[in-house]
Amino acid sequence: MTIAAANPRTSTEGLQSMLNAVSDGAGGVDGEAMVRYSAALDAGRVGESAEALFAEYLAADDPAAFANVFTALDYQVEDFNADSGLDYQLVPITPSGAVLNAVYPYMVLDGAGWVSDSDARIAGMFGDYLQTGAAEEELADAGLAPASSEGASTEGVITGETVQDAVRQWQEMRRDLNLLIVVDRSGVGEEETVEYGGEQVSAAIAEIRLALALVDELGSTSRAGLWEFGVGAVDAQTHWRAVTESAELSSEQRQTLTDDLYALSEEGLYEGGSPLFDTVTAAYDYMGEHAVEGADNVVVVLTNDGTDSVSAPTIEETEQSLATVASGQAVPVSLYTVGFGSADADNLARLAEATQGAYIEAPASGGVLDQLRGGGEG
């Protein structure tokens, strides 16, 4: 069974599903159930909403391999079945003992200190809407009425404190990534052919494709930005360039990153060697200044080189500089280096390990999100 789950921090259905999965039946959170739920999602997929996951499912080359279980509200399943055009339908199933009311998430989000400002505003807007005559009329037409507290049992009732506890546990297990993707666009990427996605392509193209896969894998509450580097990317002294500013991975930011990566793939490479050492130092300093507390702050460099005949510092000096900066950081940042083809694995490992990061040998397909979360393969 492969689960595609809506994110509990960005959707009602995600929060509702998580609460159903981890409730201890007495209004609290079962820690062991949270571990199991998080592990199931690690093996599956997390999306911004059920609608977003359904759209990815329909666009997948092999929908059956994408997921066979979704966390969604029943009306979302009905909408999907009505509009999908598939020759089969998804079947809504309510888990045994699922008695939580979908109104609880909105009741507890408004004004809670642990949610983002945007989440709190959404909750407040929804609460204001529920108090309007239009809402009462619409709910009445649907056969719904305000819950009465008279004689109601409080046993097992989900409170704001319960939701806070659940979301805190979720965030601790599934820390967001604050990621800067740095792609080598120097001429060396055109000089070597590697296998990626079942094809023989230039290392430069393989790097772009892996970056695209990584963007696709990232959760919607993570942040990501994109740099490229090559001789003279900006001027004679600056060999790296910010292509996409870092931002939370809304659907717009994800599309911008995707478009920018495709645009890079259609542009020519920079003539000359790979100015790796200066670029790595600059990217690491940048991420240190833009680190997000509570997230995993990562610089990931994609290259098929690992040497540097352009930058002034040596590998030893760059390694020492990175280690010095890393030791003084209030919010840790890790450097991961991904080597394609004949990349100098020793140099790339030395740079990464100076920051408690790791070297990753580029896969033949897909991204490297699991290695970034799990500490690399070494």
Image (spheres, rainbow, N blue to C red):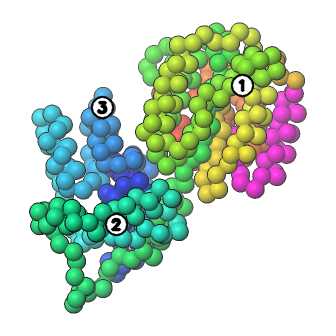
Q: Nearer the viewer, mark 2 or mark 3?
A: 2
**Image coords of residue 250 (percent x, y):** 46, 42
* Up-down relation of residue 139 to residue 91 (above or below): below
Q: Residue at x 67, y 48 (%)?
A: 291
Kind of residue at disc 3: Ala
Q: Which mark is residue 200?
A: none
Residue range of the region highlighted in magenta in the rendering: 313-335
**The disc labelled 1 sits on which kind of residue?**
Trp
**308 relative position to 201: left or right:** right
User: Which of pointers 1 and 2 indicates the residue nearer the eye?
Assistant: 2
Asked if 185 appears above or below 66 in the picture, the reply is above
- One can see residue 250 in this view: yes
Q: How much space separates mark 2 and mark 3, taking CA atoms?
A: 35 Å
Do the numbered discs 1 and 2 sit on residues whose CB atoms are within 8 Å?
A: no
- Secondary structure at badge 1 equals strand
Q: Position of residue 337 (x, y in %)?
A: 67, 33
Left or right placement of residue 311 versus residue 334 in this view: right
The secondary structure type at the circle numbered 3 is helix
Say which residue label 1 marks: 240
Label 2 sits on residue: 127
Give whichever of 110, 366 is nearer the camera: 110
Q: CA distance from mark 3 to mark 1?
A: 35 Å
Residue 307 at least partly seen: no
* Mark 1 / mark 2, whichever is N-terminal: 2
Q: Residue furthest front?
A: 133
Report the Cα–Cα distance between label 1 and label 2: 47 Å
On the image, which quarter does residue 308 sit in?
top right
Mark 2 or mark 3: which comes first in sequence?
3
Which residue position holds label 3? Answer: 59
Other residues around mark 2 within 10 Å, as few (<14) / some (14–19) / many (≥20): some
